[in-house]
Image (cartoon, rainbow, N blue to C red):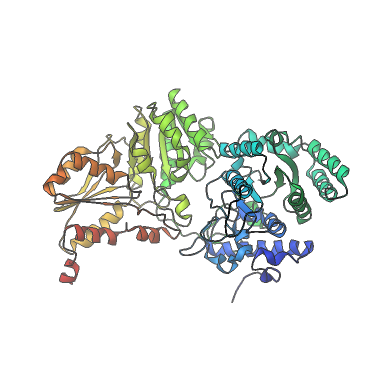
Amino acid sequence: MTDRPNTPLLDTIQRPADMNQMSDAQLTQLAQEVRSETISAVSETGGHLGAGLGVVELTVALHAVFDTPKDKIIWDVGHQCYPHKILTERRDRIRTLRQKDGLSGFTKRSESPYDPFGAAHSSTSISAALGFAVARDLGGNVPEGLGDAIAVIGDGSMSAGMAYEAMNNAGHLGKRLIVILNDNEMSIAPPVGAMSAYLSRLYAEEPFQELKAAAKGAASLLPEPFREGARRAKDLLKGLAVGGTLFEQLGFSYLGPIDGHDIDQLLPVLRTVKQRATGPILIHVLTKKGKGYAPAEAARDKGHATAKFNVITGKQKKAPSNAPSYTNVFSDYLLKAAAEDDKICAITAAMPDGTGLNLFAERYPSRCFDVGIAEQHGVTFAAALAAGGMKPFCTMYSTFLQRGYDQVVHDVALQRLPVRFAIDRAGLVGADGATHAGAFDIAFLANLPDFVIMAAADEAELAHMVATAAAYDDGPIAFRFPRGEGNGVDLPERGIPLEIGKGRMIKEGSKVALLSFGTRLAEVEKAAEKLAAKGITPTIADARFAKPLDRDLILLLAENHDAMITIEEGAIGGFGSHVSQLLADEGVFDRGFKYRSMVLPDTFIDHANPSDMYAAAGLNADDIETKVLDVLGIAQIGAATA
């Protein structure tokens, strides 16, 4: 029994070339079937729904006009790529989206030749498309060939400086390059800033229907032999649209805006551009995120990211929470701190909901700043706020903070400015996979002088770390916490600042010390329970700080035990490396002391549920138990006592 939609035309499509014989009317019907299939698939898997629904017609039109995979369609971020995957030999696996061993939720080079460039972070598409265009003109060679390069970028992604860097370079080089500005007035959060306002003015001055009619007129006039008509139509469009001058000053020919949900507009414009473009051209397309599915259109985030849901009602099938999420705990305690200190302010880069700052923005709107998809600016902005006497909490996902690393080094650390970095999504994140994993922040921050770095072992510890960061004025300080629910521990009425660089003992034992940094502490405790059944009672300690290290605690553990194992949710080069450096400097290894470091493996771990990802990483309780037995040289004890 199936509730899957009826898709007679889509059933005939395996790859884009199968669309070549379809009429424009059939392509319009095909788009509706692709929309139905997308909704049906995401209802079973969960995922990013609204973005894909907003580009269904554009996806169909692009694949109908261009010759993929020779022509390279590069989807910025990749949230919107599900319809693209349905049309490019992956429909039979579309219901494995974001599942273990299934399709990625983003474009991925290793998955398909139709994904010429991987994504998941924003604002990279124009740079990538320009690279393909130059490679084409220099005689580059790839198995699918090199044809046109088409970047599809959202108006939210255009707030990032990298997009302008690429456009400036493209305008200078003058290569044939197609940029489609997918203007839906919304990224994950409503886009902010002057760029968004500029794009809004492009069509706010006149009724959209007049612009739509003008665009249709331009589309019908552009082909031969109506050259003079095409010129007049272009001038009319530009007049109605207040210009297009920004893009033209950057060296792009500008066409638009056109209705991105009207196949009859999209097809002739794209066909004409394919036939006639000689240099860089920008096509301004208006779309609606969540288009064609009422529950998504009605949602505040337009169905950006959903759990599995009922197709009829749109109701999501979310498991009941047993404990508050780490993000919500951070949000609650930051609000408490801000109520007591009017110098506390918060910065996010287009993720107010994801980072929990939406509530802060409601309570303290003058002290909360969404800078858009602009992490570099956000970090330096926070640095100057700190220099100006404020207490900024720069709140970003670990994976996105990477984008502002030079600013962390040069503008924050070098000047020893007290920016508080609240690092969400630390560790492995599940269905978003390697692109969103918080794997590297411990390593890339811990090597910076005078940087304080904390990791919460549970939600109560997070509450105390918020208070610690708020009270710390001697330089930069960071605390990291994972995605998902806490452990269900009792939360304090208010956070209490921790002593900088001091860990805590959890349980006294013997022979081997387990030194945990972050939320793997719960798995460490599970491993200890299993070891106790085998007669082994390890000491357990929570480091709390990767920098400065608790030297006294670490050296005491080394003195009183035969071996030590550190456990962290981060890449090689992080907490464990700093512990081993300390032990080596103190000559601890000279007496035969055994040391092991459990870290994320030196590879990118594909998407799966978090438990499976941590199993792949070897950081679950069973893995910790095995490591203890191995380091003690009694790996067969389980068999001997069975």
Counting the numbered discs, the total is: 0
Residue extending farthest to the bottom is: 1
Q: Tell me, yes or no, if residue 587 can be seen here.
A: yes
Residue drawn at x 64%, y 38% is: 173
Q: Is residue 534 above or below residue 578?
A: below
In front of the other: 599 or 129: 129
Relative vertical location of residue 287 with respect to residue 89 in this rendering, above or below: above
Residue at 80 percent of width and 36 percent of height: 239
Q: Residue furthest top?
A: 388
Image check: 206 left or right of 349?
Answer: right
What quarter of the picture does the C terminus occupy?
A: bottom left
Q: Please give left or right for residue 44 compared with residue 622 in the image.
A: right
| Whole-percent x, y for residue 220 in the image | 84, 51
Pick the residue in front: 631 or 134. Answer: 134
Name the one closer to the observer, 127 or 267. 127
> At which x and y percent is residue 102?
50, 64
The residue that appears at 71% across and 60% down in the rendered structure is: 64
**Can residue 190 be seen at all in this image of the molecule?**
no
